[in-house]
Amino acid sequence: MDKKLEFSQSKTFLLGFGFLGVSMIWAMYNAYLPVFLRETFQLPFSVVGAIMTIDNVFAILLLPFLGALSDSTNTKIGKRRPYILVGAPLAMIFFILIPFANKTQMLGLMMLTVIFMNLAMALYRTPVIALMPDITPSKYRSHANGIINFMGGAGALLVYFAGKPLYDKDISYPFIAAGIFMFIACMLVVIFIKDDAYTPNETGKAEAVSLKKTFSELMDNLKDVVKGEKSLLAVLIAIFCWFVGFNALETFFTSYAKFYLGMKESTGAMILGFYSLFFIIAAIPAGLIGTKFSRNKAIRIGIFFLMFILIVATFFKAFLALAILFSLAGCAWAFINVNSLPMVVDMSTPAKLGGYTGLYYFSSQAANIVAPPLAGVGIDVFTAGGAKPEGYVSLLFFSAFFFLLALISMMFVKRGEAHE
């Protein structure tokens, strides 16, 4: 399949435009839904946190299956695009309904809206990402993933900066704007990217989707993880570990800034903003470097420097020093994140690209469920329930430890490099 493909930067940017829309949805969802749940419904933070993991739970349960399902789908409009055509409009509708459900002050209605929105997003999340390896030759997949991550990061920044004036006028305005933008972007992907091949069977007709066949293919993918050559298992463990480290930082760094550094939580968020900004800046170069030299080496260099930066950061309390360090950390994270999905899909065959994309998201989303409570317990222990602020330093060591585990695991990865 790869021999017939030609790398198209314009198609990759168009696919990235679709990912930009999806990233806008998740950035706004994560920024505003916890506020709605707390202020409108007076829910405890523990319950708010549980609700915010719904998307991760759905990801673990559904994404590997839906990836395998899209692999076995064979219709005249392709194998990925049917899921985008169904999922994107449903996700737009339920996402736009979130602020209106909030205004009703009916918790049951809000929960139904959130659950259906997450189901709709899960329906097309893996298929739309699997389009990247579908349309990209192996040796260009790190470069392509760099472009897509750049576009996704730009979507999140657009929400943070452009969403504020809309939100200040009416809380529903940014939801409407982002939902419509996401839908249009996904429809452009459906219209202009047609490389998810349709292969007529011997009768000249498209094959019906078989859930039994899909389940069998999912089991085959899981056997590849457990019984196959250990590179796939090692890289999935590494992905889990570095996302535990990353998610712990993302969740608790504003608390670290406020309760240990004595900064406002908004100042801590600004330091994370530098992290995100420099991730975007470094995303495309990181993909090019992984393609030209080695994905594995690029990832290991990124892990080492990120781990080193976090340990160094424990010695500094000044905003400027931490802003510089976290800017460098964002660059290191780009080397890791941009090259990891291409490694996973290049361990598969063309027939399993969707299924292996689902395995990647299984590992990352499992980490997002585990990280907040695990890191929270560590902070509780080392701060004696908040009585010893110096114990917040444990957060940086916690993340550095999981990055170390990821680095060790990557040493057992022998496959996944770009090939002709």
Image: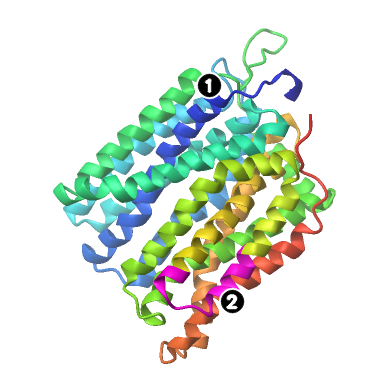
Amino acid bearing label 2: Phe
Q: Earlier in the sequence, mark 1 or mark 2?
A: 1
Q: Relative to residue 406, is residue 68 depicted above or below?
A: above
| Point 83% across, 48% down: residue | 228
Q: Is residue 68 visible?
A: yes
User: Going by the image, does 297 lie left or right of 115?
Assistant: right
The quarter of the image holding the C terminus is: top right
Say which of 73 and 250 sits in front. Answer: 250
Can you say whether 283 is above or below 190 in the image? Answer: below
Query: Viewer-proximal residue, 144 or 274?
Result: 274
Instruction: Pick the residue in front: 178 or 142.
Output: 142
Is 320 a magenta residue?
Answer: yes
Q: Position of residue 260 (x, y in %)?
A: 41, 82
Residue holding disc 2? 397
Residue 49 rendering spot, x and y as whole percentages: 40, 66
Residue corresponding to mark 1:
193
> Helix, strand, or loop for circle 2?
helix
- Residue 85 drawn at (x, y percent): 44, 26
Q: Which residues are magenta?
A: 306-321
Question: Distance of mark 1 from mark 2, alpha carbons?
Answer: 44 Å
